[in-house]
Amino acid sequence: MFTTGISAKKEAPVNFLTDPLEGRSTLRPADILVFGWVGGKHACVDLTGVSPLVGLGSSAFTVGQAALKAASGKVIKHEKACLDNQHVFIPFAFDTFGFLAPEAVDLLNRVQRVMHSNVMTPRSMDVVFKRLSFAIQKGVAAQLVARLPTISM
C-alpha cells in the first residue's frame, strides 16, 4: 500500500446519517470517511453518479445540471447532521458524461496536492486516481444496467 498522507475508510459507519422522517433507524455509512480533512474534522464524502439526461423532459439540457442538482440534494439531506456531529460534508457528484460538481473537483485537487508533497513516484500517484476512476466506472455501469429493459419469458 502506498502512503499518500491521507487516511480514509470506505463505507465507514457513522451513527448520525439518519432520516428522522422515516420513523425508524435508517443508519447508513458514509461512502468515504476522510480523517482529519478540514481543521482536524473528519469529512463524510457522499459519492453520487447520475445520468445527465435525468429530468430532461422538463427543461432545456444544460451540461452538469443533473450532477449539480444531485449534489445540492445531498447537501440538503446530510450536511446539517454532519456539522452537528463535528464533521464536514462533501458531495462528490458526477454524471455519466464526465461532469464533476465543483466540490468533487476541489476534493480531487486537494488529494493531488497532498500526493505531490508526500508520494515519491509517478506510479504510486497513479494508483489512487486509477482506483477512483474504476469506482466511478463501476457506478456508471451499475446505473446503465439498472436502466436496461427487462425481458419477460
Image: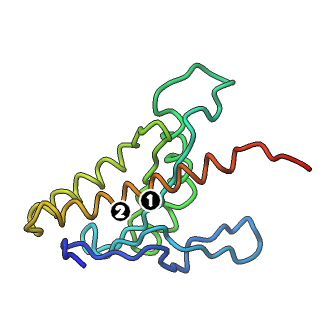
- Figure colour scheme: rainbow
Q: Secondary structure at mark 2?
A: helix
User: Mark 2 — residue?
Assistant: 131
Q: Left of 137 or right of it: where is 53?
A: right
The amino acid sitting under disc 2 is Arg
User: Mark 1 — residue?
Assistant: 135
**Crowd class of label 2 (few under 14; some 14 to 19; many from 20; radius 10 Å):** few
Percent x, y of residue 92? 43, 53
Query: Residue at (39%, 42%) from the top-left corner?
Result: 100
Q: Which residue ends up furthest to the right in the rendered image?
A: 153
Q: Left of 30 or right of it: where is 143?
A: right
Mark seen at residue 54: none
Quadrant (top left/top right/bottom left/bottom right) for the N terminus: bottom left
Q: Are marks 2 and 1 in contact (CB under 8 Å)?
A: yes
Quadrant assignment, res 21: bottom right
Please tell me how many numbered marks the rendered image carries. 2
The amino acid sitting under disc 1 is Ala
Query: Residue at (51%, 53%) from the top-left corner?
Result: 48
Query: Residue at (42%, 62%) from the top-left corner?
Result: 89
Q: Left of 144 or right of it: where is 8?
A: left
Percent x, y of residue 53? 60, 32
Quadrant assignment, res 6: bottom left
Give the Cα separation between the discs numbered 2 and 1.
6 Å
Percent x, y of residue 79? 48, 60
Q: Secondary structure at mark 1?
A: helix
Q: Which residue ends up furthest to the top in the rendered image?
A: 60
